[in-house]
Image (tube, rainbow, N blue to C red):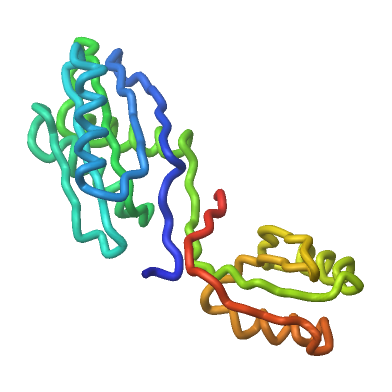
Amino acid sequence: MLESYYTVNPEGSEEITIQKSRFIGHVKRCESEEEARNFIQSIKKKYNDANHNCSAYMIGEHDLIQKANDDGEPSGTAGVPMLEVLKKMELKDTAVVVTRYFGGIKLGAGGLIRAYSSAVSEAIKTTGLVKRHLTYTIKVTVDYSMLGKLENEIRNSSYYMDTIHYLEKVEIDVKVETNRTDAFETWITDLTSGQADIIQGECSYMETSL
């Protein structure tokens, strides 16, 4: 699993108009090719009266699945430029569809490439980006007498306080990036003079909005 990568918020869209043609960009986070295909089909069904529904997607942590479709536009003027936007932004698990309603003015190959690229860029900007960090949930258990100081220190640190469990002792769940676990445990040990029980739990991704 990657320590971190960029992707999009769950779903979004944006519309732009170029030379009287409407370009509606649709974006969705998809973690499988099947999910990407289903998303594309849903857009085609919703906008079945459009002239074109061009698409592109990149799936997998190593970008092994990459597809682009011009959907009737001149070869290389829509799907591939859309895919290039995803590559340049280093986005993973992302599918995009651009719906075009032709406005009567031909754009030429260069104009189409710019239009489809812009539609994707604007849709991604509206949808929003996130960075996913691979983290461990580390459980820190202390006496109640240490809670105030420890909670304040963690909240003012670069670590993410997840949940506090008020049991016989206080259990604090903290999300820590995988490459910082040793530093975190040393920090907690110093803060509590070695009086904290520290247990490393499950590994999962945490998202940060960009």
Residue furthest to the front in view is 168
Q: Position of residue 152 (x, y in %)?
A: 84, 65
- The quadrant of the picture occupied by the N terminus is bottom left
In this view, 120 is above or below 162: above
Q: Going by the image, does 99 lie left or right of 177?
A: left
- The residue at the point 74 percent across, 60 percent down is 164
- The residue at the point 71 percent across, 81 percent down is 197
| Front position in the image: 158 or 154 | 154
Q: Position of residue 174 (x, y in %)?
A: 66, 67
- The residue at the point 53 percent across, 58 percent down is 206
Q: Position of residue 111 (x, y in %)?
A: 23, 30
To which quarter of the image does residue 108 belong? Answer: top left
| Front position in the image: 46 or 73 | 46
In this view, 182 is above or below 119: below
In this view, 101 is above or below 64: above
To which quarter of the image does residue 153 belong? Answer: bottom right
- The residue at the point 18 percent across, 44 percent down is 80
